Amino acid sequence: MNIDNTRRMLLKGLMAAAALAAAPVWAFTRNKAAFEATEPDAALKALFGDKSVSESAEVSLKVPDIAENGAVVPVTIATSLAGVKSMSVVVAANPNPLSASFTLLEGANSEISTRIKMGESSDVIAVVETDAGLFSARKNVKVTIGGCGG
């Protein structure tokens, strides 16, 4: 192997590494208006337009009743609904209510788990977008200071 071939292989490797490092920027999009909205309804409108949201027993929202640390509140959303396109988490009392939004590929597992921040006690709302419409589940979470239940 001569020096020119070695240099070409090195350059190809560096270019591939640079492309992989930049891939997350290309792969993910963000709805700036939805994340900057200051009201839950405005965030949902920015995400989904004028579609109405219906509560559904087929949307499961797992979040603690009492969050001892509002900086890391675990949330899991799951559904048995067909044709899931996206799942979003809204915290009604946060300054920017939209905490997370995930776009799912066709055939993907319809369950997401994440951690969100909550500034104060509030309703946490899971919104699932399907081919048939928007469905939600809601739960009130009490945020305590230092985990003392106060």
Image: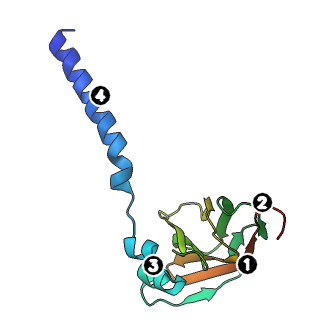
Quadrant of res 50: bottom left
In what quadrant of the picture does the C terminus appear? bottom right
Going from N to C along the chain, the mark reached first, 3 or 4, is: 4
Q: Which mark is residue 120?
A: none
In what quadrant of the picture does the N terminus appear? top left
Q: What separation in Å lies between label 3 and label 4 (alpha carbons)?
A: 42 Å
Please name the residue that numbered disc 1 is placed on. 140
Q: Are marks 2 and 1 in contact (CB under 8 Å)?
A: no
Which residue occupies the foreground of this view, 86 or 68? 68
Q: Are marks 3 and 4 in contact (CB under 8 Å)?
A: no
Question: Given this view, does label 4 or label 2 mark the residue nearer the observer?
Answer: 2
In the rendering, at what x and y percent does residue 68 appear?
76, 62
Please name the residue that numbered disc 4 is placed on. 13
Q: What separation in Å lies between label 2 and label 1 (alpha carbons)?
A: 19 Å
Residue at image coords 52%, 90%: 52
Quadrant of res 148: bottom right
